[in-house]
């Protein structure tokens, strides 16, 4: 694991002069971590860019930090095993980890939430000409979900289960987002699903290309789903967001979260939460979806699971009242 370092080479005289004239380093409280490695996603991804920007925030506060490659589920395993201090994931990953579902194999309990960031909404997009009105109508039809182990695939399979269905009840295949869109556009598939940022640029493009509709998730489905997976939330795709979508579409959400090990010292988790909150303008600048992010948003995550240190900070500033 490579850490960014600044090396200073100087003669004894030069070093003495530098000691007298250099700009002081930011003062770092004793409770801060010694360093912070942030597991993100693949190089060039939005998560990697966010991680790089967040590392700069921590570095400016006096703690050497760096982004590291990763993926939503593996990031949870990495922080739980002490491979790094922080990781990006989606809130349902916590349920998957605690249950020990694949790819974990055994329950992973040494994980806690430090902060919540942006919400992503489940988009179940179907061929409007097929007349689908509910998830149960998909039985027997060609449908493309995302690859096994992705948060989208995991939550969609849970949604099928609360409808008394399994992936085998659909003519189901898996693929990348591009393959999903192409399949629906080319009429090789009657539908696709993605937990995506909102509004979705690719969803808007697809809706202007072919006639599509968006399947709702009923209150009954949501209650059953959240009983199994309390780390999902509730929201709507507001009417008029996409072409041809004339009514609100109730759906479920997953929240992008920053996680750390549950056994991280409380003062360190407190420092991380405080540093992010006190630099919230810089955090908002990391991604367009964070433009309206508040400290209250950071403190409130579906299913809870906040690290005690982070929770203490959020309570002190009034962002967490429970």
Image (cartoon, grey):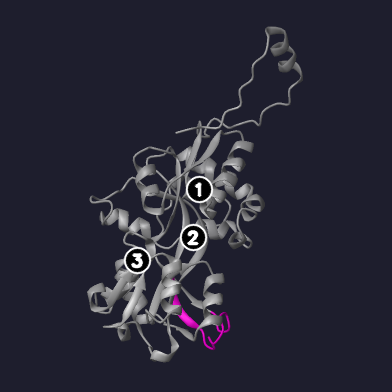
Q: Left of 73 or right of it: where is 49?
A: right
How far across and down, in percent of the image, does residue 123 sit? 45, 74
Q: Left of 274 or right of it: where is 110?
A: left
Element carrying mark 2? loop
Q: In the rendered image of this protein, does residue 37 appear above or below residue 16?
A: below
In primary-sequence order, the first of circles 3 and 1 is: 1
Tell me the quadrant of the picture where the N terminus can be found. Answer: top left
Please rate how many residues cluster around mark 1, counting C-alpha atoms within 10 Å: few if below 14, some from 14 to 19, many from 20: few
Please rate how many residues cluster around mark 2, counting C-alpha atoms within 10 Å: few if below 14, some from 14 to 19, many from 20: many
Viewer-proximal residue among 263 and 211: 211
Q: In the rendered image of this protein, does residue 25 appear above or below residue 212?
A: above
Q: Residue at x 36, y 56 (%)?
A: 94
The CA distance from mark 3 to mark 1 is: 23 Å
- Residue where numbered disc 2 is placed: 300
Q: Which dot, 3 or 1, sits closer to the camera? A: 1
Q: Residue at x 44, y 67 (%)?
A: 177
Element carrying mark 3? helix
How far across and down, in percent of the image, does residue 152 sit? 38, 66
How far across and down, in percent of the image, does residue 276 sit? 58, 47
Q: In the rendered image of this protein, does residue 278 appear above or below residue 118?
A: above
Q: Residue at x 35, y 43 (%)?
A: 80
In primary-sequence order, the first of circles 1 and 2 is: 1
- Residue where numbered disc 3 is placed: 153
- Residue where numbered disc 1 is placed: 43
The CA distance from mark 3 to mark 2 is: 24 Å
The CA distance from mark 1 to mark 2 is: 29 Å
Element carrying mark 1? loop
* Disc 3 and disc 2 in contact, CB within 8 angstroms: no
Residue range highlighted in magenta: 238-253
Kindly tell me whether residue 150 is visible in this rendering.
yes
């Amino acid at each position: 694991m490579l850490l960014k370092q600044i090396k200073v080479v100087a003669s004894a005289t030069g070093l003495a002069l530098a000691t007298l004239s250099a700009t002081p380093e930011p003062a770092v409280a004793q409770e801060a971590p010694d360093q912070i490695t942030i597991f993100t996603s693949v190089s060039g991804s939005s998560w990697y860019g966010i991680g790089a920007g967040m590392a700069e925030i921590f570095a400016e506060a006096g703690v050497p930090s760096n982004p590291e490659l990763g993926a939503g589920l593996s990031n949870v395993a990495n922080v739980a095993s002490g491979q790094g201090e922080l990781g990006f994931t989606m809130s349902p990953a916590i349920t998957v980890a605690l249950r020990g579902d694949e790819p974990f194999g055994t329950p992973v309990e040494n994980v806690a939430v430090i902060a919540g960031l942006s919400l992503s909404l489940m988009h179940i997009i179907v061929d409007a000409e097929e007349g689908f009105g509910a998830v149960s109508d998909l039985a027997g039809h060609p449908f493309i979900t995302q690859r096994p182990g992705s948060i989208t695939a995991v939550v969609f399979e849970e949604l099928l289960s609360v409808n008394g269905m399994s992936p085998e009840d659909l003519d189901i295949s898996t693929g990348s987002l591009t393959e999903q869109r192409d399949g629906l556009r080319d009429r090789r598939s009657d539908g696709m699903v993605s937990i995506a940022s909102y509004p979705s640029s690719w969803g808007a493009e697809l809706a202007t290309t072919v006639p599509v509709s968006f399947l709702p998730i009923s209150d009954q489905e949501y209650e059953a789903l959240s009983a199994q997976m309390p780390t999902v939330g509730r929201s709507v795709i507001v009417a008029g967001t996409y072409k041809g979508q004339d009514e609100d579409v109730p759906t479920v959400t997953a929240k992008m979260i920053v996680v750390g090990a549950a056994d991280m010292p409380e003062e360190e988790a407190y420092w991380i939460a405080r540093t992010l909150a006190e630099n919230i303008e810089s955090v908002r600048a990391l991604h367009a979806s964070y433009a309206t992010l508040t400290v209250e948003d950071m403190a409130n995550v579906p299913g809870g699971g906040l690290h005690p240190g982070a929770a203490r900070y959020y309570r002190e500033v009034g962002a967490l009242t429970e």
